[in-house]
Image (cartoon, grey):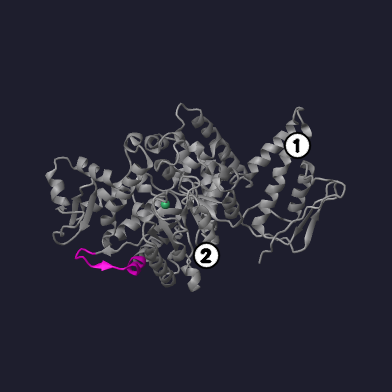
Amino acid sequence: MPHSLVYHMVRQKKKKKLQLFDSQHFADMLSLLRENKLHFQRGQSWDASPGSALRFSQEHVLALRFTARAENMVSLCLALLSSLPLLWFLRGGHAMPDPARRDLLMREEMSRQTGGLLALTAAEQKLDARLRQLKEQEMSAARFLPAVHFFRAKPLIEKSSIFKLLQKMPKGAALHIHSSSLVDVEWLVKNVTYRPHCYVCFTWDNSVRFLFSDRQPFPRWDCFYWQLLETLRAKTGDCTEFDNGLIQHLTLFTEDPEGEYPNQDVVWEKFEKAFVAAAGLVTHAPVLRDYYYQGLEELHKDNIMYLEVRSGLSKTYELDGTVHDKSWTLSLFQEVTEKFRKDHPDFLGAQIIISVHRALSVSEVRAAVKEAIQLKRDFPDVVAGFDLVGRENVGRSLWDFREALSLPAELGASLPYFFHAGETDDEGTDVDQNILDALLFNTSRIGHGYALPHHPLAKELSRNRNIAVELCPISNQVLMLISDLRNHPAAVLMSEGHPMVVSSDDPSLFGTSGLSYDFYEAFVGIGGLKANLGTLKELAVNSIRYSSLPAHLQNAGLHMWQNKWDTFISDNS
Ligand SMILES: [Zn+2]
């Protein structure tokens, strides 16, 4: 059981102001910490015994009393570090700064960033030097790819040597992906729509619906005229063009993103339509089985070993119209995951975060929470928790749902939350406050957290409670929160070593696969030249550490990941 850490700064009686360390004091403190086998690693346990103290017999007395909780140590050290530059500048006035102190200042700042405290092996340093050289080349190129819209940058990113290395890198887990956009749309169209009994209907609002049926489907409010896809495709002279037309309905990808999506409203409308269009294909029971296996295959191919997928568990249907309930769908998910693990022993597994749309009423969400509590009881190893999805700006805020979200506490039940929060650039609005409300409701991670750097208290709380932000850079760019990824707010979080993982949100809609594309944007664009191999290593480790896996499976996963990492380093250094 770790102890909580408190520290006391003792002022000298004669001093009016507390003077913190100079570099010598800091170096002394570091060596004392090392002697006591304490490490500056967030999230690790500490072996400081209660009541033990580190004392400095220097002019400025500081006593550190360890009674200690690990994660708070980082905050303490950062607080101490933050005083150093100020002290130096005050002492130096306008005189020429000491180059040695400048160098130390730079190194200390670097140590705060994601992965900044990791010591790299000789082989890792070699690969790191190569990565830096490659990054310098990409940064000095005529077009810096993270500043370009992903739809235009994608073919160029695929040629990047950094991207090719990232594809080979073991990236750990994918913790923020939605089930309806898990699999490449090319597979959906070229495989699924070629199956028999597939009907298609083009709607009045320029969308498309699919339905598998053993008879001609009845007209519906949104679809009056269903056609057998096989027959329709045969009638068109050019199957490729016809299939490309279908693909256009299932993805946001376009060659002219700025022209086609002039604002967030337009891009979100197309985004939601694509989800509805895909639903008829992926909720057909035999397709869902193959679809989900294919999704795991695509992740595994990109060197990912574990998945937490958000899913509404939409009703799955058979050819004769029989509809299955959510328990049936969870059993199928469990069965397919087990089969995939058997076929791929280096894959850890997968869990589902049950998610409902935030456009629902409070009573509907309350019912959904109640149902999720039961499903979590029935499938404890499959259901990770609960989330609300859909555009935050137009849906209800978390606070609107407070009655529904308080239900687990009322019932004394366990239902971890994984809220999308702060996926907005509307600062100061109710939606913007979702980020604080997510923390009030004890969210386990924060989906996106785009607005987090604007909320100092929320930032502090999430850091102290080790609540990771799920960074999805390509999603933020395509859904028009940011155009040049160098300006992404997560750059601040990354420079501070805030708990963070990288994910892809809706890979099929953005034309990505796995996590390598998002890792590229985070590493090259958001992290810039500062982000190094240590950053990549910590991001990958974070993805397992911040997952819902129980401790023993996290440890097994980290061990397995380390072996893959060592092979990756020796193959590429
Ligand atoms: Zn999402």
Magenta segment includes 329: yes
Mark number displayed over residue 48: none
Residue 10 at x, y = what percent? 81, 53
Tell me which residue sits at (30%, 58%) in the image. 290
Q: Give the CA distance from mark 1 to mark 2.
A: 46 Å
Q: Nearer the viewer, residue 259 or 22?
A: 259
Compared across the picture, whether 530 is left or right of 35 comes to left
User: Considering only vertical position in the picture, is 477 above or below 223?
Assistant: above
| Range drawn in magenta | 318-331
Residue at screen point 44% across, 55% down: 397
Toward the right, the furthest residue is: 14
Residue 550 is labelled as 2
**Secondary structure found at label 1:** helix
User: Taking 319 as reference, is 180 left or right?
Assistant: right
482 displayed left or right of 324: right
Disc 2 residue type? Pro
**What residue did someone put label 1 on?**
88
- Residue at position x 26%, y 60% from top? 284
